[in-house]
Image (tube, coloured by chain):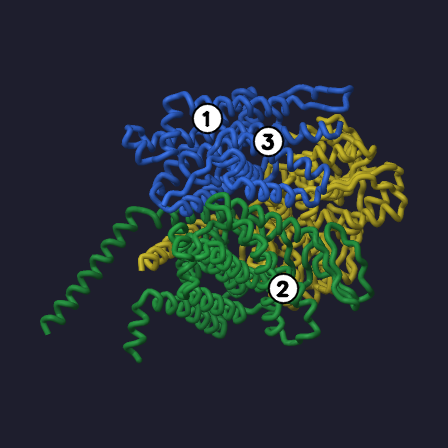
Amino acid sequence: MSFLNHLISGISLGSIYAIIALGYTMVYGIAKMLNFAHGDVIMVGGYMCFCATIYLGWPAWAGIALAIAVCTVLGMAIERLAYKPLRMAPSLAVLITAIGVSYLLQNAALLIWGSSPKMFTSVVGGQPIALFGGQIMLAPVTLVTVLSCLVIMAALVLFTGHTKMGTAMRAVSEDKGAAQLMGINVNTTISMTFAIGSGLAAVAGVLLCSAYPTLMPTTGAMPGIKAFTAAVFGGIGSIPGAFVGGILLGVIEIFAKAYISTQLSDAIVFAVLIVVLLVKPDGLLGKRVSEKV
Amino acid sequence: MLQKFKKYAVSRRGRDSLLCFGIVLIAYIAVQAAIAGGALSSQMKGLLVPICAYVVMAISLNLTVGILGELSLGHAGFMSVGAFAGIVATTALAETIPSAPLRLAAAMLVGGLCAAVAGVLVGVPVLRLKGDYLAIVTLAFGEIIKNIVNVIYIGMDGRGLHFSLVTQNFTLEEGGKMIISGPIGVSGVKTLSTFTSGVVLILITVFFVLNLINSRAGRAIMSVRDNKIAADSIGISVTRYKLLAFVISAAFAGMAGTLYAMNFSTVTAAKFDFNTSILILVFVVLGGLGNIWGSIIAAALLTLLPELLREVGDYRMLIYAILLIGMMLFNNSKLKRRLMEQRSLKQMEKLEQAADGKEGA
Amino acid sequence: MKKTLSMLLAGTMLVTALAGCGGNNDAAQSGGDNSAAADGTVFKLGGTGPLTGANAIYGNAAKNGAQIAVDEINAAGGDIQFELKYEDDESDAEKAVSGYNSLKDWGMQLSLGSVTSKPCEATAAKTFEDRVFALTPSASSTATTEGKDNMFQMCFIDPAQGVLAAESISAHKLATKIAIIWKNDDVYSTGIHDTFIKEAKAKGLEIVSDTTFTEASATDFNVQLNDAKSKGADLVFLPIYYQPASLILTQANAMGYAPKFFGVDGMDGILTLENFDTSLAEGLMLLTPFNADDEKNKGFVEQYVEQFGETPNQFAADAYDCVYAYKQALEAAGATPDMSAEELCGKMIEQFTSMTFDGLTGSGATWGTNGQISKDPIVVTIQNGVYVTM
């Protein structure tokens, strides 16, 4: 039974990593940049939903809508102001700028909301469901998290595969110059990607805070790094890869804690990651790019 | 002689080394003069050794990122290895080597050596990967090193050094001393680092790295960066040179770690985390990839910046973030390119004028 | 050469930004601080703590608590007047030393050390070297005061809490099987955990589960709780701060596990967590030097709520006490603000080792020559959302 319990916790944690990783991977695939500020957009999403539901007394769905709206606009604004001027710059310059944006968001949040942690009220109410005569307790938020993760992934796969905008995104990701020649507006496409990625971050923020309900200016930082790891694990740029990577990372983390050592769990998670990358150097579902001379 | 020097100074290689050594030496003399004249605040004095450590870190990371062209996000891990190895070494050698500077030098060697070994362990698997996958694996190694240092217990007594992992399963004799006690880290170290020792370490690092860049090995490393396949095809062993650069970079990071650790009476593994690695990377990128003297200036400036911003209180880190973004944007902006163009135009005019003058005479 | 110019420009930007901001700040400070006087008429009191970053809550609480005490003392008039300055250290030893140095440049005469343990160990080495007396509100590791005659603590040392917790669990016969969840990259948590294990063994308490987490894995506690549950632990000891503890309580509740929970002083503040469902903390026991619901602390708590909009925790109370302890010692020693830090240091060592201090965090407190405090700890249970002394 304890195995099942651990598996459930692992999948629940993994689904959150997966949603964050989906945002990472979208942005990476199209804009070819590691957006280290992604984790902090999550935090902003969490705070927005918190403020709406607690301070303004809005219902949960309105709080989520506000979080998504604010984060989408924020993501587009960050892209416009900080990343767009660097489109021609070396990728490391963009990386450092992203880190600057991350510091900026964290410290702005610290000034606005203060340093004390806030207790988030889960947007998913209800009592835990008892299975096997109460040996396994399934929290409703776990179910919602896993389901939303699946829905988001399916929606993204359909969107990138079957809509005009999605096709444009794939074209830009393949070759910016050629896409432009085909009449695709590269700037709009990239801006759109950031909007979607940041909207996902808001959802991830609300779900993260619902499952693990404390909210601080640094709330997004660690899940952000873990999700980045998950995205690479699954093969960065690949949408199913981010999903698989996220779930696996969560499950490995919980199993390492449960069956090996709580003290060394971080080291074990990263060691597994390294071994996987050595065997499959492009991640689990990454595309193998052959080198051209 | 003078002619020769002029020629050397004008060459790219000569200009770089003169600039590097010049900046460090002038800064050293200026600081010493300021201390002698009592013009330096204690805040600045306290920052001198950390700045030296960060400068060495930046130069060594530049070797990996700038010269070898591989992104590393776990450089602080090597600093950590060097820091803790150096502390164990100084405690163990306390009686054998009574002279403080010599003991520090010995500790740095041990720290550098241990970090180099860690560099080989990390480098052999990691360098087979490329791009962002390599970056994430260095990040992973940095975290693993941090996690492992967190569960190390090392103590010393009359019978020698004791070592255990996860839980402390040895007891020390009367008069014994814990050197590293797991998560509590290191406390009550006798500090040994001085500004002079820091500057000496910078000079050694600069000397070594510049010589490496301008040697056969250095050109091989850069050829690997510029075109791996071409380098491979002319018989350069890509793996070997990648590993060489990576391990040297780790070794200097280890020495910087020792210097850093011996400046504070307490160190924990948590200090050398992902954020520290990123901080060093910011120095390197802002100073310019492959530009050694740029790294020196950027490391010094950016370590000073948050300290100088103490005046603004709560808004300190916010302003630091805005300045960081601003600098990156400016560095890659059209405005800067235009300024640069104007400047080189003026220089060309000057050269033309000089040439005209010569012809006229 | 391109780089030189960019560096220069970056430098100029930096300087202009500094000048601009510096100017603003001066104006703001002189506006807010009406007691600022010329050197030699007030005692300059300084400390470092994490005002930004993940531990910002502790630093800000201490800073605010100390500020209230200073304002009260200054408003009351009298011979002893203070000026307080806190520097940010992000809970990092390097930044703490730098902050301490900048306080020294400011002319600090008495130090409040640092708020968290590791930075305080680093600044303590400096205050010892410079002969500046230091009294930390909350840095509780033994290494903080070890070997330094001028470093004193207002809080209990970590091992003392481990011993106290084991003693009260055994004295009240609270449990037969104990589980511990602690944070293994934290000095505070490790210090309490280690002595608790030793003391519990001596007292014949059975520890069935001993699990950890780190900063990086402080979100999901299902594994640790499952372990405790499956091994039949009827009490879970939490030598950690209240932020992760609140997650543990929530997750235990969600999985239907309801043992007794026992915390240490870091648990104080859990009821003040904004929007926290206090019913989750019902029955929670903790060691605390400070009870915000106590009648005698009412004045301080009200003032704090009014000024900073939240209920103070023990960090704030400890820092408040530090300032009053300084006042008492300075009065007794007949110290004047024109004395140098070194003169004051000698006098303070004399006073602190001989005086008895009554404060918010305990009455009849005394200090040993090793700088450690002895005062009566209170074990409280949370009942109906308030602390009830056991």
Q: Amino acid at mark 2?
A: Gly
Write down which chain is painted yellow. C
**Chain A's shade in the image?**
blue
Instruction: Please tell me whether mark 3 sits on a helix, a strand or a loop.
Output: helix
**Disc 1: host chain:** A
Residue at (44% x, 55% y) in the render? B68
Residue at the disc numbered 3: A247
Write down which chain is painted green. B
Viewer-side residue, B164 vs B41: B164
Q: Nearer the viewer, mark 1 or mark 2?
A: 2
Q: Position of residue B319 (x, y in %)?
A: 45, 47
- Give the Cα separation between the discs numbered 2 and 3: 40 Å
- Give the Cα separation between the discs numbered 1 and 2: 52 Å
Residue at the disc numbered 2: B86
**Disc 2: host chain:** B
The image quadrant that residue C262 belongs to is top right
